[in-house]
Structures are given as structure tokens and as C-alpha cells.
Image: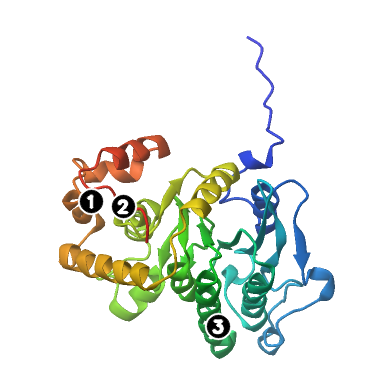
Amino acid sequence: MALKPVTFSADPGDQSWYEASARARLAGLLDAESFQEFIGPEQRMMSPHLPLFDLPRAFDDGMIVGRGRLDGQAVLAAAQEGRFMGGAFGEIHGAKLVGLLRAALAEAPAALLILFDTGGVRLQEANAGETAIAEVMRAIAQVRAAGIPVIGLIGGRAGCYGGGGLIAGTCSRLVVSESGRISVSGPEVIETNKGAEEFDSRDRALVWRTMGGKHRRLLGGADAFVGDTIGAFRDAALTQIAKAPAFDLATLEAEQARLEARLARFGDCHDATEVWGRLGVNDPDAVPGMTTEAFDALLARLPEAPHDAR
């Protein structure tokens, strides 16, 4: 029997989000050839600190920012390159994102998109990186107060940890995939400070069910769960822009009440599977192996659907 030739789709939307570079994600997410980069690699805006530690630098410092169009709508977008220093925040890296957020106040785009892929803050630029995190969070609050949705997209290799996890929490809406791990403290950090008996960073199943996209969606910490394709993220981003809540006192009070209720209900749980059981999942152990379609069906039939507006 003759074997059929293997063919690959030329549609960038069919590419794996997890495997793609930051630039490939932007190219597939936004309308074709619409992205215009600010402060590109040709300007050589690199970290001034890394040479002190004999570490290589990147011409874009692992942060790509610019404007483009999403289904015809004008948007601003930032993408972290997780392959460079784990997408960690440093002085230039953070400043580019802060500058983009400030530009949003002047340009008033339909939305600002942040493609997270970060392990947190660079130890070599700790003070500058931590300052950048605070400045980004303040800028996001200002952008949202101006009525511009800030949509976070999470599904890369590095996840969204440390200060990146804090920034994600300030976004209007979050879209995650199976690989979209979100946490302030990463697995290795927890293990270093509390020991492997508290959290074994080598236990990938534990990491994914505690910090992964399915758990975040079930808890209501993310607003959409998608498959691992750039096209799926694009579709979800369009949907979430339209659903972005107002940034006002009522929204903040509702979020605070939701978090207090979540802590009261699940605070004594020792594993994510216990949380899922209390949410009404009949077979919690089966959740990690579910396909995107099966997981969507689970969400639809839960007695208490995950919160749909953070």
C-alpha cells in the first residue's frame, strides 16, 4: 500500500502556540502583515546589566511591542520571548511594555494584548525588574480605567510566573491553554523555600494540575480555555475583548468578594483534585487527560460554572 505524503498547513493559525516564537505568535494572531514593531532589533536596545555577568544579550531584550490589527480592529500588542532568559523581566524588557501601555492612552486602540511567556524577574536585574513589574501594573490600571481592555494570552514554554503572574491578575481578561501555567511562585521556588515534601517541582503532573490552564479556568482565574493553536488564541482574544468588564469600584468589589469566597471554600484543600470535586466534577482524576472538547463539555455541565467575569 502506498503511503500518503505528509502535508503541513501553511496557515499560521494552525501552528502550535507552545512551540512558536514570540514573533510567530504575533504574526498568526494579528491580521496578515499588519504588525508594526516599535523599538525593533535594529535599534539594539539591549540590557546594560547582562554583560556584567558575562551573559549574552538579545537585540530586542526578549520583548516585542508594536501595533497591528485584529479582525480589522486597531490593537497594540506585546509578546515575550520565553526562549531568551525564560522571558524574564529586566530594565529594558519591562520599559518596553510600560511604554506600550502608555502609548495606548494616546492611541486608544480597541484593546491591548499581552502574550505572556515568562519565568518572572531576572535575578541579574532584580531591582530594575521588580520596579518594572510595579510600573506595568500601574499602567494597566490606567489603561483599563480609560476603557481599553487589556487581554492576557498564556500558553508558552515558560508559563507566567513571578511578577508576570501578578501582571496577569491585573488584566481585563485571561485566555489560557493546557500549558498556560500561572503562579506567583514557581515550582522550584516553592520547593527551595518549603522543601520537596511541600511541593515537588519534578512532579510534572502536580505542577500542571496546581498551576495549569485547566485548574485556573475551573477556579475562575482565567476566562477562556483553548487548544494549543495560534488560531484558537486569536478567536478567544476577539471574544474576550467584547466581554471585558468595566474597571470600576463595583468590578473591584465583586472580585474581592469572589476571592474571599474562594479561599473560604477551598482553603483547606490539599490538592487541586479536591477543589475540582467540590466544584462538582464527578471524576476529578480524569481532568488532566481531557481533550479541549471534553473539558469544554465539563465546564458546560458543572453545577456551578466557573466565574465568567473577573
The residue at 55%/63% (across/down) is 117
Q: Residue at x 16, y 63 (%)?
A: 265
User: In the rendering, at what x and y percent does residue 78 appear?
Assistant: 64, 65
Distance in Å between CA atoms under marks 3 and 1: 35 Å
Note whether residue 269 is visible.
no
* Residue occupying the point 29% across, 71% down: 256
Q: Decide which of tag 1 and tag 2 comes sooner along the chain.
A: 2
User: Is 162 on the left or on the right of 23, as rendered?
Assistant: left
Secondary structure of the residue carrying tag 2 is helix
- CB atoms of marks 1 and 2 within 8 Å: yes
| Three-letter amino acid code at the position of disc 1 | Trp
In three-dimensional space, the C-alpha distance between marks 1 and 2, rounded to whole angstroms, equals 7 Å
Q: Position of residue 172 (x, y in %)?
A: 47, 63
Q: CA distance from mark 2 to mark 3?
A: 30 Å
Q: Which mark is residue 218?
A: 2
Mark 1 vs mark 2: in front: 2
Residue to which mark 1 is pinned: 276
* Quadrant in the rendering for residue 185: bottom left
For label 3, the crowd category at 10 Å Cα-Cα, with few meaning under 14, some 14 to 19 and many 20 or more, is: some
Res. 4 visible in picture: yes
Q: Residue furthest top?
A: 1
Mark 3: amino acid: Glu
